[in-house]
Amino acid sequence: QVQLVESGGILVQAVGSLRLSCAASVRTFSSYTMGWFRHSPGKEREFVAAISWSAGRTYYADSVKGRFTISRDNANNTVYLQMNSLKPEDTAAYYCAASLPFKGLGSRSSEYVYWGQGTQVTVSS
């Protein structure tokens, strides 16, 4: 069982920056591919970014490529999402997710088994 707790979501102005964190309570964190998704009212849940269990590969949605960076600290069981040049359309609840051990990168929510409760990011214009 993997428990995930996100933090860092706040109200921020457009073109600002924000870093989200996701702490995982699992001893073998380094074996899990991790992802970030977001969901805003009236829209389907959207893939944002993923990082492989080896941290050697990352994958981004086109809408955030070049603005967001996903990274992980396996020593501290934490995955991060650095968000720069924020836009009002980035407003959403952001969720951290973990796949099964040693799975490859994925952008579909069905590929992830464990989910956090989410943290709200609001970007004002």
Image: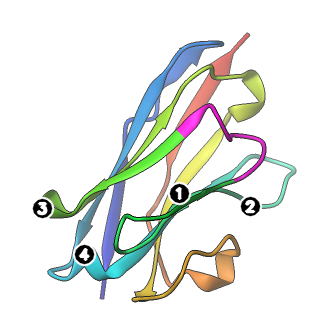
Q: Earlier in the sequence, mark 3 or mark 1?
A: 3
Q: Within 10 angstroms of label 2, few (less than 14), some, or many (20 or more) residues? A: some
Q: Position of residue 31 (x, y in %)?
A: 30, 82
Q: In which image quadrant can residue 68 be found?
A: top right
Query: Which residue type carries mark 1?
Result: Tyr
Q: Is residue 81 placed above or below 36 in the rendered structure?
A: above
Q: Within 10 angstroms of label 4, few (less than 14), some, or many (20 or more) residues? A: many
Does residue 40 appear to the left or right of 96 in the view shown? right
Q: Is residue 27 placed above or below 24 in the rendered structure?
A: below
Note whether residue 36 is visible: no
Q: Residue at x 67, y 84 (%)?
A: 110
The residue at the far right in this view is 42
Q: Position of residue 59 (x, y in %)?
A: 60, 59
The residue singled out by tag 1 in the image is 95
Query: Which residue type carries mark 2?
Result: Arg
Could you tell me how many numbered marks the image carries?
4
The CA distance from mark 2 to mark 4 is 24 Å
Q: In which image quadrant can residue 18 be found?
A: top left
Of residue 7 and residue 83, the one placed in the foreground of this image is 83
Range of magenta residues: 61-68
Asked if labels 2 and 1 touch by Cβ distance under 8 angstroms, the answer is yes
Asked if labels 4 and 2 touch by Cβ distance under 8 angstroms, the answer is no
Asked if labels 1 and 3 touch by Cβ distance under 8 angstroms, the answer is no
Query: Which residue type carries mark 4?
Result: Phe
The residue singled out by tag 3 in the image is 75
Q: Earlier in the sequence, mark 2 or mark 3?
A: 2
The residue singled out by tag 4 in the image is 29
Does residue 49 appear to the left or right of 100 in the view shown? right
The CA distance from mark 3 to mark 1 is 21 Å
Asked if labels 3 and 2 touch by Cβ distance under 8 angstroms, the answer is no
